[in-house]
Amino acid sequence: MRNNIILKLRRRLSGFFPTAPISVYLVVMTAVITLPLVIFVGYLMLKLEANETGDLQREAVEDARAVSRNIDRRLQEMATTLNLLTQFPELEDGDLAAFHKRVSESLERQGLYVIVATADGKQRLNSRVPLNQPLGNVPPDIKLQDVIAGRRIAVSNIFYGNTSKEWVFNVMRPLPPSLSAAGDALIMTQNASDLMGLVSTDGLPSGWTIAIVDGNNHVVTSSAPKTIAAGSDFDHTWANEMQAFSGSFENEDGIIYAYSQLPGWSWKAVIWGPSDNSDSALASTWRKMMIGSLTLVAIAIAGAYLVGQQLRGSIRELVDVAKRIGEGEIVSPIDTKIKEANQVAVALSNASFDRSQADDRAHLILHELVHRSKNMLTLVQAMMRQLARDSTTVAEFQKEVDHRLRGLGMSISALSEVQWQGLPMRKLLETHLKVFGNAIDQVKLSGEDFILSPEAAQNLGLIIHELATNSMKYGALSEAAATVELSWVRKMNGEKEMLTIDWKDVGGPPAVAPTRSGFGTTITRRHAESAFSATISTDYKECGFQWTLTAPFHKFLAQKKSVLPN
């Protein structure tokens, strides 16, 4: 029934549109598009004259939101930097001197400074001053204890810094118990004046002002620092009107206020200015635009007719080319005055060549598929043979096969997501560690990321899966308080670049050397040596198991292959 209705509608429309040259259709299309636009512009002009104040308020709210997003982005960047700093090993070791040197060199150029403080507000480190200089307490107004108790990242209100002698603000992050040797909180401080570049009045009407206001209604920074200085009180009368997340209002003096709360923070962006400051020539401009639009409609119709004539000639040439291709000819591209028509001509020319190359392309793709399937089957066969020798019962054999195939399947699944184009090193490691549940939180990854070839990803995935399985049974991952440090580093050895991967159990049970060589040893040693031409070293220490692989870096990268023909 529905198809019959659509068919009848198409028949009626086909009768409504007569057969005509393309130039005629272009003229009609131009008129159909432009005339409603001219009418709509006239309607907008009338609405604009009646609602200029409302439009101005909405624009001011959007500007306030844009400013709040800029400030939020800056605070989020600082919060992200704090999260990264908590990963520094110097904090875990409580080596504040090394941490001070590292953060001073990297953050001072950005105008950022780091403070490590205890729960009672005592500063243990301040990168704004030399390490050995005596330090006082952080200001009580920043409510550091509330941040630590709430276990969340927060921004302070603006305050005058005793060390910087400027108005500053802090972004604070509580430190986890594992870093208690360093302190209880990590604080990043920045001068409020550094935010001035984010409150530009470009695009605002003349006489309008932007300010960032903290949770105590104090100005953090403004676009007019000489008259509205940092630390000054914002008008509490109008501040009480700003209770929603964002909005605008006009006071009795004709001043429009627009504001937007920073999501997740206690600050807000405020924009204000006179409501009668909108451009008085705007309505006149719109009237002139109406007259100009009607003139442009006439010009557009004439231009559409000329363009239609040009398109008509180019299309006829393309039709001739298509007929020749249908007759089996290999044609050369034609040159017309229309760039898109030339592109179609090139595509038609290429199509005449593609037919003869399709068989070669299919052959190469099939060869690659067979090659990958054979490699995978060879690996599975070797795995089955080894597990069959090590397993004592059918149930044990089934369990071990399922476990290893799941590890191999995870690598293949991750590679399929990127269409077998290679897999980032960190993503491969995280993918295999996720299968062990919360144990992934005990593994600390470090190293410069790079793209593994599909073959290297499968082989390394098996090795990491086996190391993690062994650690869950006998090593650091078997105890919640222990950790694993999994790192990789690239170094030059003469003229050859080498990659070293290191698995180190920390804080777990003492490592005991196995009494026999099983499947795990085969994967982590023999298979690793064979797959990567690697040197493997293992150490069974009182403090935990350590495994190190050193191999040529090119063994982990995709080998260059011939490009398939287009």
Image (cartoon, helix red, strand yellow):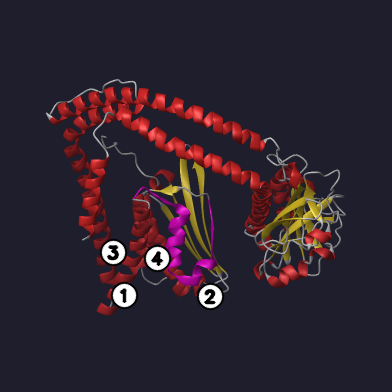
Secondary structure found at label 1:
helix
439 or 164, which lies in front?
A: 164
Q: Which numbered marker is on residue 383?
A: 3
On screen, residue 62 versus residue 442, left or right, reads right
Give, as a single range, the part of the protein colored magenta.
Answer: 420-447
Q: Nearer the viewer, mark 1 or mark 3?
A: 1
User: What residue is shown with label 2?
Assistant: 479
For marks 3 and 2 on the same chain, the one whose residue lies earlier in the sequence: 3
The amino acid beneath tag 3 is Met
For marks 1 and 3 on the same chain, the one whose residue lies earlier in the sequence: 3
User: What residue is shown with label 1?
Assistant: 399
Marks 1/4: CA distance?
Answer: 14 Å
Residue found at x 77% / y 44%: 223
Would you say residue 441 sits in the magenta stretch?
Answer: yes
Q: Is residue 249 visible?
A: yes
Marks 2/1: CA distance?
Answer: 23 Å
Point out residue 440 in the picture as x, y percentages from the top left corner.
50, 67
Point out residue 8 in the picture as x, y percentages from the top left corner.
21, 51
Would you say residue 453 sits in the magenta stretch?
Answer: no
Q: Which numbered marker is on residue 466?
A: 4
Residue found at x 74% / y 61%: 242
Secondary structure found at label 3:
helix
The amino acid beneath tag 2 is Glu
Secondary structure found at label 4:
helix
The amino acid beneath tag 4 is Glu
Q: Kindly indicate whether the residue at mark 1 contacts the one at mark 2 (C-beta within 8 angstroms).
A: no
For marks 2 and 4 on the same chain, the one whose residue lies earlier in the sequence: 4
